Structure formats: structure tokens, C-alpha cells
Amino acid sequence: MLDFIGLQYVSAGIERLILFLFPALTVLLSALFLGRRIGMAEAVALILSYIGIVFAAQQEVSLDGGNALFGAMLIFGSTLAYVLYLIGSGELIPRVGSR
């Protein structure tokens, strides 16, 4: 739902860029909450991903102002919810089973 509401404020291109940050965000949150180590290649990929999003979204924010930032935050919330689902299910399914 957050994704669809966010689309009212930003373009579909920016929305896709933010949504496809989920692998980087999964690595980062897994390191923070599960104690998994981030390798050098992963760290470089994280940095480049977020720098690229800032550059891509900068033009949209300058054109639309606060509305674009609000929409981007909603879409990021959607991405964060999906990442938390991935991390939680990745830890819970091996313990409980898929049934």
C-alpha cells in the first residue's frame, strides 16, 4: 500500500530504483540485527547503490520539492517492510519448517 501511495508523488522510475535497493538493505540489516559480516565487495556495492539513488532522486526532489521526498519515504517504507519480511522468514522457516 505504501508503494502505491508513494507513486502519487514520484515517478515510476524513481519508485523502481528505491524498490530495487532491497538486496542492499537486506545485507545491511542482516549485518546489524543478525551479526552477519559485510565483505568488502558488499560494502562497495552498498555505498554505490545509495549514492546512485541520491543522484537519481536529486533531480526529482528539486522539481517536485517536499512531495517527492514524502513519496520516496513512503516507497522506502514499503521496501523496508519487504526486507524485514525476508530477514524474518529467512530465520524463522529453518526453525519452524515450511508447513
Image (tube, rainbow, N blue to C red):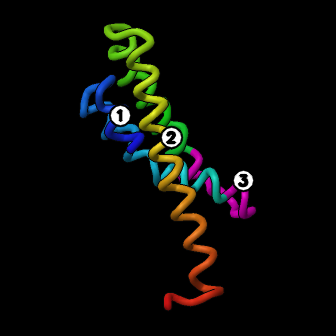
Examine the structure image and report whether residue 72 is included in the region drawn in magenta: no
Q: Quadrant of the N terminus?
A: top left
Query: Could you tell me which residue is drawn at 40 percent across and 22 percent down?
Result: 55
* Left or right of 76 on screen, residue 91: right
Q: Does label 2 or label 3 sit earlier along the sequence? A: 3
Label 2 secondary element: helix
Numbered mark located on residue 5 in the image: 1
Examine the structure image and report whether residue 37 is included in the region drawn in magenta: yes
Q: Nearer the viewer, residue 60 or 55?
A: 60
Rounded to the nearest angstrom, the CA distance separating label 2 from label 3 is: 18 Å
When asked about the image quadrant of residue 27, the answer is bottom right
Q: Residues within 10 Å of mark 3 (few under 14, many from 20)?
A: few
Query: Could you tell me which residue is drawn at 32 percent across and 8 percent down?
Result: 63
Q: Residues within 10 Å of mark 2 (few under 14, many from 20)?
A: some
When asked about the image quadrant of residue 17, the answer is top left
Tag nearer the camera, 1 or 3: 1
Rounded to the nearest angstrom, the CA distance separating label 1 from label 2 is: 11 Å
Query: Could you tell me which residue is drawn at 53 percent across and 44 percent down?
Result: 46
Q: Which residues are magenta?
A: 31-43
User: Where does residue 65 sit, x and y in percent of width and height?
Assistant: 40, 9
Amino acid found under the numbered disc labelled 2? Gly
Numbered mark located on residue 32 in the image: 3
Q: Main secondary structure of the magenta part?
A: helix
Q: Does label 1 or label 3 sit earlier along the sequence? A: 1
User: Where does residue 21 sit, x and y in percent of width and height?
Assistant: 44, 45
Tag nearer the camera, 1 or 2: 1
Numbered mark located on residue 51 in the image: none
Numbered mark located on residue 77 in the image: 2
Amino acid found under the numbered disc labelled 3? Leu
* Left or right of 93 on screen, residue 71: left
